């Protein structure tokens, strides 16, 4: 995504018009339009003002992705109570069908024993709760996965 699209999406997500943004920044509406169409770009000071106005960091503003922001907000706004009711295997199986079939093929107990040892090590060595140990182990697995190539 280019900067202009990021600026436009961030402005719309904030519920502001080009006119309102222009007024708050002390520039013309045409300037905002030119930024959003990549005809010109805001300087660093104007970019900082835009980030503040849109309640984003400068990094978030530059790479603003409205879909990613929606997902992040949905996660942040989901209560523990609702999370406990979600069958995550079923949800993720829609994207990754292996999650609904592996139980019939994989010797789960074989891996469960090893994973329980790792979880217990994390709890013992670092004082993590069950949930924190599980999250840390999941994150370590993600790091291993990302380093595979």
Image (cartoon, helix red, strand yellow):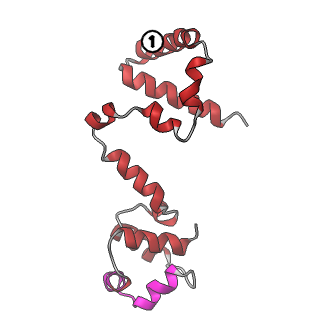
Q: Is residue 69 above or below residue 148?
A: below
Secondary structure beneath disc 1? helix
For residue 48, side relative to residue 82 (left or right): right
Farthest residue toward the right? 149
- The residue beneath circle 1 is 120
User: Nearest the camera: 16 or 88?
Assistant: 88
* Quadrant assignment, res 85: top left
* Quadrant assignment, res 38: bottom right
Q: Residue at x 64, y 33 (%)?
A: 145
- Give how far across and how far down residue 118 sits, in percent: 51, 14
Q: Magenta part of the protein: which range?
A: 20-36
Q: Is residue 148 above or below residue 77?
A: above
Q: Is residue 66 above or below residue 131?
A: below
- Quarter in which the C terminus is drawn: top right
Q: Residue at x 58, y 18 (%)?
A: 104
Query: Is residue 31 part of the magenta span, yes or no?
Result: yes
User: Nearest the camera: 125 or 123?
Assistant: 123
Q: Residue at x 58, y 9 (%)?
A: 110
- Give how far across and how far down residue 112 sits, in percent: 52, 12
Query: Is residue 141 part of the magenta span, yes or no?
Result: no
- Give how far across and how far down residue 41 sits, in percent: 54, 80
Q: Residue at x 58, y 70 (%)?
A: 2
For residue 97, side relative to residue 129 (left or right): right
Q: Is residue 12 above or below residue 137?
A: below
Dominant SS in magenta: helix
Total label count? 1
User: Nearest the camera: 78 or 11?
Assistant: 78
- Give how far across and how far down residue 96 sits, in percent: 57, 37
- Quarter in which the N terminus is drawn: bottom right
* Quadrant assignment, res 39: bottom right
Q: Crowdedness of circle 1 by 10 Å Cα count: few (<14), some, many (20+)?
A: some
């Amino acid at each position: 995504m280019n900067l202009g699209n990021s600026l436009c999406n961030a402005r719309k997500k904030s519920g502001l018009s080009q006119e309102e943004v222009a007024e708050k920044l002390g520039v013309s509406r045409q300037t905002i339009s030119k930024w959003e169409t990549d005809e010109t770009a805001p300087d660093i000071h104007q970019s900082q003002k835009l980030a503040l106005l849109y309640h984003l960091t400068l990094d978030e503003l530059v790479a603003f992705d409205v879909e990613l922001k929606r997902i992040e907000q949905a996660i942040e706004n989901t209560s523990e109570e609702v999370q406990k009711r979600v069958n995550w295997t079923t949800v993720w199986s829609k994207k990754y069908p292996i999650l609904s079939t592996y139980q019939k093929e994989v010797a789960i107990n074989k891996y469960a024993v090893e994973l329980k040892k790792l979880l217990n090590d994390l709890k013992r060595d670092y004082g993590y709760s069950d949930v924190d140990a599980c999250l840390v182990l999941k994150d370590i697995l993600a790091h291993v996965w990302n380093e595979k190539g």
